[in-house]
Image (spheres, grey):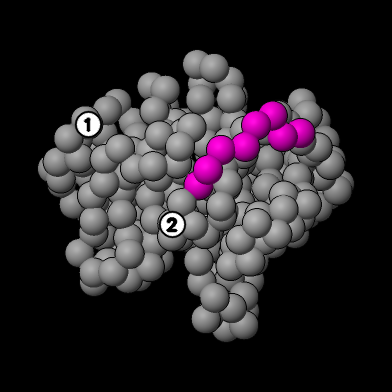
Amino acid sequence: MRKIFAPALLILLFSCNNSTDNPNSNDGKTGIPASEEPKALSYSVVEAFPHDTSSFTEGLLVYKGDMYEGTGNYGRSHLMKVDIKTGKALKKLALDPKFFGEGVTILHDTVYQLTYFENVVFVYTLPDFKKVKEFVLKKECWGLTNDGTSLIMSDGSSNLDYYDPSTFTLQRTQSITQSGEPVPNINELEYIDGYIYANQWQFPYILKIDPASGTVIAKADLTKLWDKAKTIYPRADVPNGIAYDSSSKKIYLTGKYWPELYQVEFSR
């Protein structure tokens, strides 16, 4: 997502964390001390499907059995409904070239799509992708998911922001820590069975986060999956894209310019 600002951005991300939590306190949900190393989250690939290598994936989700994807880059940003088995776009809405598309989520048949530097959140209705509203946020916008009540957004820092979906009013900010330290570069998000799963930009990791405490309790290393994607398509960039079908309990992963979408099973 952000190849050109890495050194300065990393410094900024660490300086922006405003957590006041005690890093040695217990994880209120699991009883695990927040300073402990997260457990290894293993996974297995169940099936692989085609994925469009022109898609700079910023958001991925399954809603009522259908997959939706948001892509980035200026002049290349889209909101799409995608056929899982073929990787083809069934419906596609192009953003104005001045916008860099970011994370996407759907709540109550309403689609929310972030933009990166432009500070605009687009709101659409289903199934027509009709834009019905815009919100303005005076900050960078990266990943987006929801817990059924609130919208949960990452901004590349070690914080997650919770917003009211009707007004985009900030409800609260949760700092995210791993082994007692702030976690930088939190990116694409997915809410799965009470936990937040997050891609970490520039790293091959998916973090499993306890939203009650903000503690990373488990961590999956996607290096082998990323290597496989690069073997098929050398331009395959960082892992980014986590989707969960709550009806079938299937989880899907992909990345920026990846040639494949993977259905996986995580260890529990």
Question: Quick one: SS at disc 2?
Answer: loop
Three-letter residue code for mark 2: Ser
Q: Is residue 139 left or right of residue 173?
A: left
Query: Which image quadrant is residue 19 in?
Result: bottom right
Three-letter residue code for mark 1: Leu
Q: Is residue 45 magenta?
A: yes
Q: Which mark is residue 55?
A: 2
State if disc 2 and disc 1 touch (CB < 8 Å). Answer: no
Q: Which residue is mark 1?
A: 126
Measuring from the top left, give residue 107's x and y in whole percent. 33, 31
Tag nearer the camera, 1 or 2: 2
**Neighbour class for label 2 at 10 Å: few (<14), some, many (≥20)?**
many
Please state which of residues 192 and 169 is positioned toward the viewer in this rendering.
192
Residue 121, placed above or below residue 211 = below
Residue occupying image coordinates x 32% and y 71%: 74
Q: Is residue 47 magenta?
A: yes
Residue 212, placed above or below residue 249 = below
Q: Which mark is residue 59?
A: none
Q: Is residue 95 left or right of residue 88?
A: left
Residue occupying image coordinates x 38% and y 38%: 82
**Neighbour class for label 1 at 10 Å: few (<14), some, many (≥20)?**
few
Measuring from the top left, give residue 84's x and y in whole percent. 46, 33
Please state which of residues 51 and 268 is positioned toward the viewer in this rendering.
51
Q: CA distance from mark 1 to mark 2?
A: 22 Å
Q: Which residues are magenta?
A: 44-51
The answer, for residue 33, to whether it is visible in the render is no
Residue occupying image coordinates x 76% and y 35%: 43
Measuring from the top left, give residue 158's x and y in whole percent. 60, 59
